[in-house]
């Protein structure tokens, strides 16, 4: 009888601990952002476009709101400002042409987080989507003939009326962790790495002529975003994730 009572107490304590208790948090994040053009899902390296695509490194900053419904599942909604872009280089013998595009984008991602946490740490993967709007940009084309760089106008304002699509949207994949650093287990340092794959064309009409065979390719944007930040949480205390011994649960 005593054994049965002990088993029932343990089972009841386990169910109680497993009930969903919401933990919400708000915070900031900053870090690098690396943009890059893609040539469709089948040819992400743009090899069939006859050139070399390069990353354009910039800055990422954002505000995020995060909710953990229980120990394993949560959602993350953010507002970000991402400076990225892309570059393309075409080499023909001793001559080459390089096009550099920089853009400033306001991005709103929404992701589902699936992970695990203990008293001091949460680690997770996330999947979702994002919507972006390019508020401004600039372009520079550089021609090199026989090793000599030809005169150019430097960076000029990007044409988002006739050339580029200002709207961007696609899929976001990533992972991250948050480490609770204060005694009350409310404040935490966060680290996130996310990859955005755009589904909307970068160019409004046919891809520009500096791409070989522009009618055969579809250029879409992508970016890799890394953020280190700070998050303050409300509601459920992370102290509740402290591992409990069987004797502790019986006494409770």
Image (cartoon, rainbow, N blue to C red):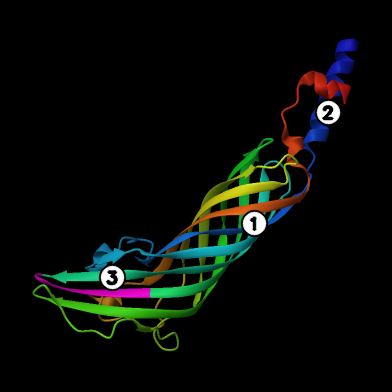
Question: Over which residues does the magenta segment extend?
Answer: 93-101
Q: CA distance from mark 1 to mark 3?
A: 33 Å
Q: Label 1 vs label 2: CA separation?
A: 30 Å
Q: The residue tagged with tag 1: helix, strand or loop?
A: strand
Left/right of residue 46 with respect to residue 168 in the rendered view: left
What residue is pinned by disc 1?
Answer: 76
Q: Which image quarter holds the C terminus? A: top right
For residue 77, what is the image quadrant?
A: bottom right
Residue 173 horizontal/vertical position (percent): 51, 55
Q: Earlier in the sequence, mark 2 or mark 3?
A: 2
Instruction: Please say if 65 is above or below 239.
Output: below
In this orientation, does residue 201 appear?
no
Q: Is residue 40 left or right of residue 142?
A: right
Mark nearest the camera among 2 and 3 is 3
Which residue: 59% across, 49% down? 190
Q: Check disc 2 and report the residue beneath it.
A: 13
Q: Residue beneath label 3, please?
A: 88
Pointer 3 local density, CA inside 10 Å: few below 14, some 14–19, many at least 20: many
- Position in image of residue 196 (x %, y %): 48, 61
Q: Nearer the viewer, residue 131 or 188?
A: 188
């Amino acid at each position: 009888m005593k054994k049965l009572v002990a088993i029932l107490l343990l089972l009841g304590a386990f169910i109680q601990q497993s009930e969903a208790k919401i933990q919400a948090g708000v915070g900031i994040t900053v870090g690098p952002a690396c943009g890059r053009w893609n040539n469709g899902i089948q040819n992400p390296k743009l090899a069939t476009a006859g050139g070399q695509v390069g990353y354009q490194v910039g800055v990422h900053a954002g505000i995020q709101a995060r909710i953990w419904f229980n120990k394993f599942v949560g959602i993350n909604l953010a507002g970000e400002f991402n400076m990225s872009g892309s570059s393309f280089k075409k080499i023909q013998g001793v001559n080459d042409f390089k096009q550099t595009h920089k853009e400033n984008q306001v991005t709103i991602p929404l992701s589902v987080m699936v992970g695990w946490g203990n008293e001091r740490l949460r680690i997770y993967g996330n999947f979702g989507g994002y919507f972006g709007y390019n508020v401004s940009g600039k372009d520079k084309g550089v021609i090199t003939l026989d090793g000599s760089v030809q005169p150019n106008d430097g960076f000029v304002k990007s044409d988002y009326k006739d050339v580029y699509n200002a709207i961007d949207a696609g899929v976001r994949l990533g992972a991250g962790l948050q480490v609770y650093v204060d005694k009350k287990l409310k404040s935490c340092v966060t680290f996130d790495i996310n990859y955005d794959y755009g589904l909307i064309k970068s160019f409004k009409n046919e891809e520009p002529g500096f791409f070989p065979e522009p009618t055969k390719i579809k250029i879409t944007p992508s970016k890799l975003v890394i953020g280190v930040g700070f998050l303050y949480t409300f509601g459920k205390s992370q102290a509740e994730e402290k591992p409990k011994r069987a004797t502790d649960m019986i006494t409770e």
